[in-house]
Image (cartoon, rainbow, N blue to C red):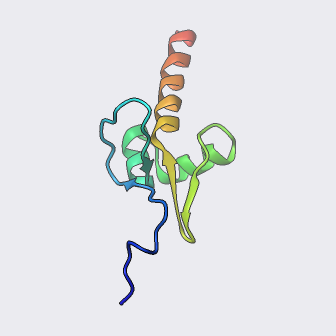
Amino acid sequence: MPELSSCTSRTVQAVSKPSTLPPGQDKVLRIRAVMDLTGLSRSSVYRLALEGRFPKSIPLGPRSVGWLSSEVTAWIQGQAESREVQA
């Protein structure tokens, strides 16, 4: 059985639930965590990303993607700020 530690040169941390991070650090959020943070459905996340109105996903493997927590958080802040401008 090959050793896994010798196979990976760079590690990307994927999480299903977001946590508080020190400034300057980022996590990769899977779709469930993005849905929990934003309140959007899976199809809405992908549709908004296709339209350029939500951060693009990053590939994690052949059949998995994630989103940078900083970009999702910035999108949420932008939504809140646009609400204040419209009011």
Q: Nearer the viewer, residue 71 or 1?
A: 1
* Outermost residue toward the front in this view: 6
Residue 45 % position (x, y): 54, 47
Residue at position x 52%, y 17% in the image: 81
Q: Nearer the viewer, residue 76 or 60?
A: 60
Residue at position x 38%, y 72% in the image: 5
Residue 50 % position (x, y): 67, 48
Residue 39 % position (x, y): 41, 40
* Outermost residue toward the right in this view: 51
Residue at position x 45%, y 56% in the image: 12
Q: Nearer the viewer, residue 40 or 24?
A: 24
Residue at position x 43%, y 74% in the image: 6
Residue 19 % position (x, y): 30, 41
Q: Is residue 79 left or right of residue 15?
A: right
* Outermost residue toward the bottom in this view: 1
Q: Quadrant of the N terminus?
A: bottom left
Residue 24 lies in quadrant = top left
Q: Number of labelled discs?
A: 0
- 84 vs 14: above or below: above
